[in-house]
Image (spheres, rainbow, N blue to C red):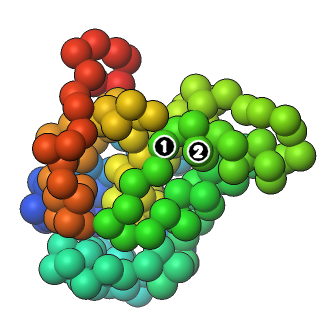
Amino acid sequence: MYYRTSYDSPVGPLMLASDGTSLTGLWMEGQKYFGGAIREELVQRDDLPVFAMTRTWLERYFARERPDPSELPLAPRGGEFRQAVWELLCQIPYGELTTYGHLAKEMAARLGRASMSAQAVGGAVGHNPISIIIPCHRVVGSDSSLTGYAGGLEKKRYLLSLEGIDVTTLSTPTRGTAL
């Protein structure tokens, strides 16, 4: 059984999901891939300890206290490749950016391959089911473009600014599937 609760954040309402022990999802209202890989019914339950921990984590994050993803029991649902990409995302330090190309090189090295497609990594990043906490918003294009965000570019800009990143140095693409 899976459970859900909500959290009112500075980027709007968030839905949190749990298997009862771990956090399995965190989605922004209207986010692309809302609900992720959870196909089961989500039963409303506000009193789970993991939800209390997540609310505290989010309060600290929005207060610029730099909480780390490792402070929460995370259990995003996805295949082995996506899990590995999400693990890499958790290693991006607060207030820092990386590129899809850099993540692709990291994944290629982990898998013992000569190279890997940045688009394949981008697909896994885009399907991240635990937004904000697994910091996919810290990934930009190699040309310093925002390249899209499942929660919307304005929310990505907000999160990056919150972390102290000068978003005026980042360009906004004029077309693309992630807009």
Q: Are marks 1 and 2 in contact (CB under 8 Å)?
A: yes
Identified at 53% across, 79% down, the residue is 70
Where is residue 171, by image quadrant?
top left
For mark 1, what is the residue? 99
Does residue 55 appear to the left or right of 118 in the view shown? left
Location of residue 20 with respect to 155 vertically, above or below: below
As helix, strand or loop, the secondary structure at mark 2 comes to: helix
As helix, strand or loop, the secondary structure at mark 1 comes to: strand
For mark 2, what is the residue? 102
Location of residue 18 with respect to 136 vertically, above or below: below
Identified at 16% across, 80% down, the residue is 63
144 or 43: nearer the viewer: 144
Tag shown at residue 62: none
Q: Is residue 167 visible?
A: yes
Q: Amino acid at mark 1?
A: Thr
Identified at 69% across, 50% down, the residue is 106
Does residue 136 appear to the left or right of 104 in the view shown? left
Residue farthest toward the top in the current orientation of the protein: 175
Where residue 103 appears, as percent x and y from the top left, is 60, 46
